[in-house]
Amino acid sequence: MNSVHQDDIHLLELLTLANHSVTGWQDFLDTLVSHFNLNCCNLYLISMSSQSIRFQDWSGTRPSDIQLNEYAMKYFHSDTTHTLMLFGPEGEWLTPNLREDKEKLESTAAYQEWAIPNNFIYSTGTALFKDQESICAVHFNRGAEQPAFTQAEEDRFTQLTPYLTTAVKLRLKIASELTSQSLIKPLINTFRLPVAILNEFAEVIASNDPMEDFLSTSKNLVVNEKLLSIDNKDNDFNLQFSIANTISIAKEKHLDYEPKTVSVHNEENSHFTVGVCELMEKNQKQSEVFVGAMVYLVSRDRMQSITEKQLKLIFELTTSEAKVCSLLMKNIPAKKIAELECKSVNTVREQIQSCYAKTGAVNQLELINLIGCIPLED
């Protein structure tokens, strides 16, 4: 490996610890941002087949979900700088402000209409490694209040690259090898719904019997090279974004009392929706640690057959609570329920909490699973 600039040696020390603690990678990236006076750093793995993000770690100024969605939907495929970086040689940094074609790269809509308004003025990045399934890349940004990147800095980034690449590859290996199927399988088999668990790289690491049965016959939802996907392009984008967003939020611990569950509706005759929520567990210090993303399927036909009358009778819900509960079971989020029922989001959330208390469920997935076990009325 290349020798590293003496000012950057302490980064290697943090990098060697990155895979040995829950906060290791975040500690490394936070120090990296501060050390090089960056606006932000983005480390991510992108799927070659779907062009979707499989995992993403940020430090510094992170775009909002709305900004990221805008970039993905409108600018991603026309971002010349990003494309050159991703498909350039492994470990070769692309820094637009150091290139002869700087003006051409900065004339694109992605730069003028997205990067500048969001204060991502200067950028540099590289593809750390590639295979047939994915590309792992790292990207640095600076804002208008910071200086442009220099050649000396790019040289230092190049020196660090082999060490960063080795650490990320080890991270991938650990994620695939340390997952205990013997522990997860019994857990997810307690769900009557089809359920699959995805690791931080969006790979399916376990699925319960109903999910395996469903996947064996489904043409709409499939697992290809460990990645879950929907045959409809728009719905698949929504699913991949939901998975990436759920993982990102959970790892950054921006958790609300309401799970980050997002529905993806397939074709009307498919009769199911796909939900995503985080799976967390407490470590020895009683802190919540991200285990994986839980993807589950809800049969709309079955859930629509459970009447509000049944819900009121079995769980002693009020009429309003039974209505909210009925909508929750169809994987409809709180904000949408508020719109449908012409209520405030706070009122709906209070009713959701009451439904959880009366049914004994702790979140939307548990509620759906619980009610899915109720015999249907004739």
Image: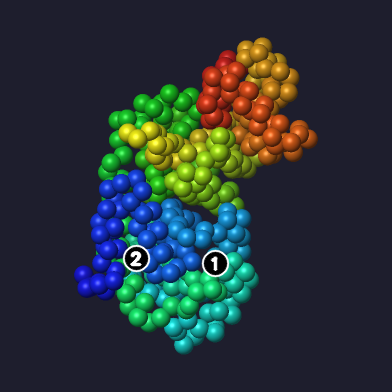
Q: Residue 170 sits in which quadrant?
A: bottom left
Where's residue 279, x and y in %? 44, 36
> Any mark on residue 128, and which?
2
CB atoms of marks 1 and 2 within 8 Å: no
Relative to 97, is 291 on the left or the right? left
In this rendering, the label closer to the viewer, 1 or 2: 2
Residue in view at x 29 percent, y 58 percent: 15
Give above or below for 157 relative to 316: below
Q: Residue flagged by tag 2: what amino acid is it?
A: Leu
The residue lying toward the viewer, choosing from 42 and 26, is 26
Residue in view at x 71 percent, y 31 percent: 347
| The C terminus: image quadrant | top right
**Gap between marks 1 and 2 measured at Cα:** 20 Å
The residue lying toward the viewer, choosing from 130 and 68, is 68
Q: Residue 13 sits in which quadrant?
A: bottom left
Where's residue 203, x and y in %? 39, 46
Residue in view at x 51 percent, y 44 percent: 254
| The N terminus: image quadrant | bottom left
The residue lying toward the viewer, choosing from 13 and 278, is 13
Q: Disc 1 designates what residue?
A: 77
Asked whether residue 57 is in view, the answer is yes
Q: Residue 289 sits in which quadrant?
A: top left
As helix, strand or loop, the secondary structure at mark 1 comes to helix
Give above or below for 369 relative to 248: above
Where's residue 240, x and y in %? 51, 50
Mark 1 surroundings within 10 Å by alpha-carbon count, few (fewer than 14), some (14 through 19), many (20 or more): few
Give above or below for 165 relative to 195: below
